[in-house]
Amino acid sequence: MKILVCIKQVPDMESQFIINSQGNWFDENNLSFRMNEYDEYAVEQAVRLKEQLGGDPDITALSIGSGRVVDVLRKALAFGCDRGVHIVDPDSCAKDPWQIASMIAAFAQTEGFDLIFTGMQSQDRGSAQVGVIVAELLGISCVTTLIGFAYDNGVITVKRELEGGVKGVLKLKTPALVTCQLGLNVPRYPTLPNILKAKKKQLVAIPVGDMPHVRELTATCTIYRPRKKAGGLILEGDVGIVADRLMGILKECTMVMK
Amino acid sequence: MKALLVCEYREGKLLDSSYELVAFADKLGADNVLLLIGSMAEVPRVNSTVYLADAEIYGEYNPDLHKKIVLAAVERENPDYIVFGHSSWGWDLAPRVATALRAGQVSEVVDIVDGQFVAGICNAKLRRTVTPKTDTVVLTIQSGAFNFDSTRQGTPLVERIELSEVIPSLEFIGYEPSEAKSVDLTRSEVIVSIGRGVGKKENVAVISALARALGGELGASRPAVDAGWVEHCQQIGATGQTVSPRLYIACGISGAIQHLVGMRESDFVFAINKDRDAPIAEVADVLVVADIMQIVPELTAKFLKTENTFRQAG
């Protein structure tokens, strides 16, 4: 069995974002990067399936981006993936979901994976498109937003998260692509021996020029900060003084204090 | 300019979000036709053409079939825009339709400005404007971003859509209901909520002390529930409860849209957060930039003291 996990490296969402000089993306300097949260659930689920099947599946972790994305590939290898593939593309952040998905699909086409795991969306762009487009381009079954996954002899039973706490239960057969949601599993912390082992695992770099190029279907023009709520007040500084101000506001503006 | 609005239907009912699509099309200035995979009894009350495919045959969630139904409606109408709600159904189906048509897709649109679509990035901390580069464009719109008139009435012109051959690759087994709500937060006047920023389970007691002091209930965002700090029945947001208290205090909640949709109808919102750029600031009347573990006990103590003074005076 061959498994592919697609992972993206994204900025830590707690970061202070600064808009770049062109005004069309955020400045990458001084940002710390990490594995996209939803992709961690994808890696964890792939590794759990490998463990369930006695180590048989071969797991490839794929990431697209500049040199820094090697960090998340190493992390995926420390989770238990078998090899990493890095499509080296310094401009990946300017590409739209269609262009990214086309590269992944082109790679997957040559390898013939039985199962592909992705996150349900990225934390930065949040388009929730790439996984589904990959599946459609490959012509394989696809379910999104998984919070439950069970595999038995080529048949996958999944639980999707719907609105209002309702879940949808479905069955599908491999080959398939599934996108993973918060709540599917609790990703492990890689152990030191596994981190060391990961350093010896195969990591292949593919220049983006070797991948087929398709034109973008959507373009990001500008990015900006949303306006804060009109009249919204910001309080900071000495805790005692701030608490006093809050008490005053509670008295004036709310019904909590008579 | 024409928009095909793909309505959402679940467990036998048309979802209200379908009318938000109409509000969106109005703002876009597009003529609209609708598509419902549902039942005759649930056809939306609009003065437009509504294509109806029977959910008894095509299922409530069956993306292979639903994609083909949407494409059949596209072929008849040749719309400029194909619009879905950004929901578990819409974000699943929209990219399938977009791929089939090689159409550009913009996800989770919150606004239209000068003909460009606006969407959030980085947990809604930033916004971006997007221009589609294709003649046909697929859109998913954020729930709650385009307000609809719930009193709208109309007489739809219903046209049936049927597919000739039906071979789905997914087998829909059924729905699992949400867990019973043992805490009903929908009627609470005061809610103090915790998020990931609270840090650890041991810190939750400090926040619940404030909730108790204010005579309110403890709520939570999704990550706090998933971390096991509180029960699922206390969750507020898209996959939890929708609340509208007089006072909402968000402690360590960054303000992901999934949470905001559950609490933005609150009368007055305090947000306590270390990060002044957290998107919760967008809905907060007062943003307190501080360490929760310092400010919350201070506030609780001051509040209890004032209450006691009142009681003694009374």
Image (cartoon, grey):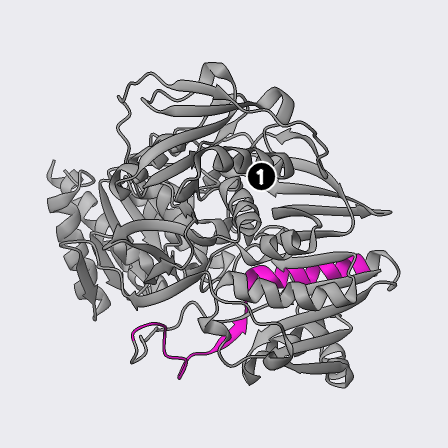
Asked if residue A34 lies in the magenta stretch, the reply is yes
For residue B30, above or below residue A60: above
- The local crowd at label 1, few if under 14, some if 14 to 19, many if 20 or more residues have their Cα within 10 Å, is some
Foreground: B86 or A257?
B86
Q: Nearer the viewer, residue A41 or B40?
A: B40
Chain designation of label 1: B
Write down the residue under mark 1: B67
Amino acid type, callout 1: Lys
The answer to which image quadrant residue A220 occupies is bottom left
- Can you give x and y, in whole percent of width and height, for residue B170 in the image? 71, 38
User: The C terminus of chain B is located in which quarter?
Assistant: top left
Asked if residue B19 lies in the magenta stretch, the reply is no
- Write the residue at 32% across / 58% down: B279
Q: Using residue B294 as the reference point, say whether residue B228 is left or right of it.
A: right
What residue is shown at x 41% (from left), y 68% (from top)? Answer: A14
Describe residue B158's horizontal placement relative to residue B298 as left or right. Answer: right
Image location of residue B72, percent across then percent down: 54, 34
Foreground of the two, B4 or A158: B4
Q: Is residue B275 above or below residue B79?
A: below
Q: Position of residue B75 (x, y in %)?
A: 50, 37
Which residue reaches farthest top? Answer: B41
Magenta span covers which residues? A23-50
